[in-house]
Image: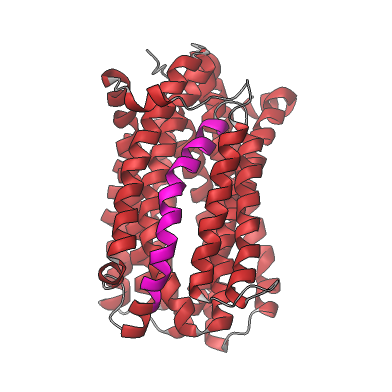
Amino acid sequence: MILRDIIQDHAFNRRLIVLSVPITVQSLMLALVAAGDAVMLGRVSQNAMAAVSLATQIQFVQNMILFAIVAGIGVMGAQYWGKGDREVLGRIFGISIRMSVGVCIVFFLGCRWFPEKLMLLFAHDGELIRTGAEYLEIAAWSYLLTGFSQCYLGIMKISEHVTCSAVISSAAVVLNIILNAVFIFGLCGCPAMGVRGAALATVAARGIELVWCILVSRKPDFIRLHFRNIITFDRQLSADFLHYMLPILGAYLLWGTGFTAYTAIMGHLGPDAAAANSIAAVVRDLLCCLCNGFAGAAGIMIGNELGAGNLERGRVCGDRIAVISVFLGLTCTVVVLASIPAVTSFMKLTPQAETYMRGMFMILSVYMIGRCICTMIINGIFSAGGDTLFDVYSLIVCMWGIALPCAFLSAFYWQLPVLAAYGCTCLDEVGKVPWVICHHRQYKWVRNITR
């Protein structure tokens, strides 16, 4: 019945694609920045690549906080946009800017004035600390700008300007990669600056991205940032924003540290296991851009309906998204299995690493079904109705209570094969599926959170 309705409702499918494609492309482009830095700095020296990789872990922490703030814009903003209340949207924009500026100033001051001390958190080698600190001193300026631009892009997504948001973000990524080549290697008459060039390219790209956002938002149909909305403290609206944003931040921190622990466990199982895991992680992250795009689109569509008071239509839309998540997961399974021959022929691996990689891809093909279902339902459907605390519970139980202990014990105490340890790292998403579907069918997320 639901499947037939999905096939016949062309307007629903068209809007889902129109929203999901730009968000997916934006996610893919952002993933290319780290890859571009690694490839180019790897041509300079191994230490340069390693130092910048370690230094950007600070930005990773900042980004998790900023992404939670932007997710808060998505949760509340989508509903108020569906309600047609542009005045409250402007105030939500101001709240998000105020929070982002506070976060960015802390990271800017730390990276600008104490870069060596921050690098000591990730390395003890003097050369790596010196090189990383050199990068952070310049890149700190980009950390100051990122909060503004991310809030601008977030408010565009939920106000029918998702394509514009994706174009600006993707263009900034392309510019960043081009400037990386120019400044790192000294092209077009510029001096070769190595690590400092990579940092300068990031600052320039972020600056242009922010200016572009400000200029575009001056158009009549965009939500503008007014200074009064930044300095005026709306107690009730700020409390609502924190109520929905803080659980998302908690989920990001649990997820980020959990995945870092997964990587560390696989890294301790030897170079062959680490190499195979890194390849599987690249494929996983690329496919996750697709389910993230659909989850973002689902959150906007369902949030608009719930905010407009169309609770029944929001529920029907959520049921359809849940069904689509299953088919998207099966599609990702086919892609993972079909990519095994191509990846095997392209990568130069030892026979043992290749065996590990093939086994990991088989496990990953099953994992992607759970990942797509959980991502689209939790980050898309539940968040649209303000049900943001469920993700925290599911991560505590499934990742930190089951998957991580099993992976740790299988690797270091039970001495199980490498693929068994890898399989344990995939237990969380697969194990959450019955719980997620059960919670979805309770329809606690079907609610209007606007005032």
Screen quadrant of the N terminus: top right
Left or right: where 128 falls relative to 272:
left
Is 317 left or right of 66, judged from the image as shown?
Answer: right
Location of residue 161 by image quarter:
top right
Q: Nearer the viewer, residue 20 or 381?
A: 20
Position of residue 219 measured from the top left corner of the image (x, y, whole percent):
63, 25
- 155 magenta-colored: yes
x and y percentages locating residue 130 in the rendered image: 35, 78
**Identity of the residue drawn at 28% across and 81% down:** 124
Query: Closest to the observer: 379 or 180?
Result: 180
Residue nearest the observer in this picture, 118 or 274:
118
Q: Is residue 420 visible?
A: no
Quadrant containing the C terminus in the rendered view: top left
Count of number-bearing discs: 0
Magenta-colored span: 131-157
Whether residue 264 is visible, yes or no, is yes
Does 239 appear above or below 105? above
- Which colour style is shown? secondary structure
Q: In the rendered structure, does residue 54 fall within the stretch colored magenta?
A: no
Determine the image quadrant of residue 92.
top left
Q: Predominant secondary structure in magenta?
A: helix
Is 149 left, or right, of 129 in this rendering? right
